[in-house]
Amino acid sequence: MFPEVRMRRLRKLKLIGESKLSTDDLILPLFIDENIEGENKKPISSMPGQYRFSIESAVKEVLEAHSRGIKSVLLFGIPRRKDETGSEAFNKEGVIQRAVRQIKKDVENAVIITDLCLCEYTTHGHCGLVENGSVVNDPTLEVLGKIAVSQAEAGADIVAPSGMMDGMVKAIRENLDKEGFTETAIMSYAAKYNSALYGPFREAADSSYKSGDRSSYQMAFSNAREALREVELDIREGADIVMVKPAIFYLDIISKVRERFDVPLAAYNVSGEYSMITAASENGYLNREEVMMEGLTAIKRAGADLIITYFAKEVAEVLRQSDK
Ligand code: PBG
Ligand code: ZN
């Protein structure tokens, strides 16, 4: 008799689910703009459904996310004042420092992750200090160390360096430890590709570079083995969590990192991934909810423990409905 094995027997029972999204795994990115006052928030035109928040409205957003089971947020700051060296990034009264203190005060058990980079804070928009037209590595490390300490001081649970500078994790760990912040964790953007999918984010975070590009620090999309070297180095330097970014075009990288290393792995479902699905569904070409769930479950299936996604609140809602 053939077929002896009938795969459809169990499939129709819908009993076996190998990968399942959970609100515990989701991290919601938020943009906090110092130029926005009171309870206001401002829509981001390239990311329909996403906003820039004031500190006050951000607190409300974190509370709402919390009530839906999303307890972790990743904060990006947009300062009122930018300069050549990004000095607002380590101002005690800077937008992120104030936001972190306020969220810690108002939201019990919030896990706060702070983006640790210079591009939102510098006039040139690069992720490091610029000298004679190029981004210089080692002087940047000193600034990153200072920013890390000021974010930890404000109450950040995890700092997330996103600039792809060599040695950034080690420099940050040393600075944090020296100042007594041994409990502050580091989530490193270990394998961050130079991706066109960041386009909408740069409007959202006002972090476009004014000249050049990011190819001297972010990875070429043709490379996979290089990602494993990047991850290995960051682990050796003390990263608590490593990240692959973007996510859906890079599932092979997520899967390779998962197989090779045992550290917690995060994947960043980036702005362009969000905006593509949003635009296609607004045009009626795709079903937003279905594509969202399929894409995010694929990231999980590839091996990510944590997913940073603008869809976090919506996924939580879908999960809640399906649990009923
Ligand atoms: C910058 C940074 C970028 C993102 C997060 N941090 C963009 C860039 O490298 O230009 C992208 C996130 C997204 O697209 O959602 N350090
Ligand atoms: Zn940056």
Image (cartoon, rainbow, N blue to C red):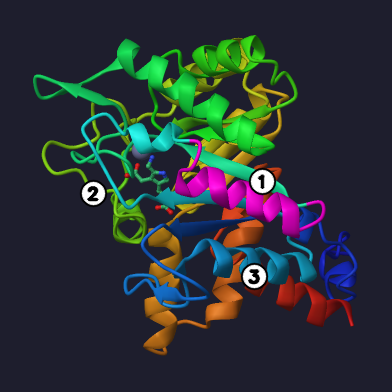
Residue range in magenta is: 92-109
Can see residue 71? no
Residue 80 placed where, x, y %?
32, 52
Q: Which residue is mark 2?
A: 208
Pick whichever, 199 or 153, lies toward us.
Answer: 153
In the rendered structure, the answer to whether residue 188 lies left or right of residue 315 reads left
Tally of numbered discs: 3
Q: CA distance from mark 3 to mark 2?
A: 28 Å
Vertical comparison of 52 with 246: above or below: below
For label 1, the crowd category at 10 Å Cα-Cα, with few meaning under 14, some 14 to 19 and many 20 or more, is: many
Q: Which residue is mark 1?
A: 112
Q: Which residue is mark 3?
A: 60
**Hey, what amino acid is under mark 1?**
Ile
Residue 16 placed where, x, y %?
87, 62
Residue at image location 64% in from the left, 74% down from the top: 314
The residue mark sitting in front, 1 or 2, is 1
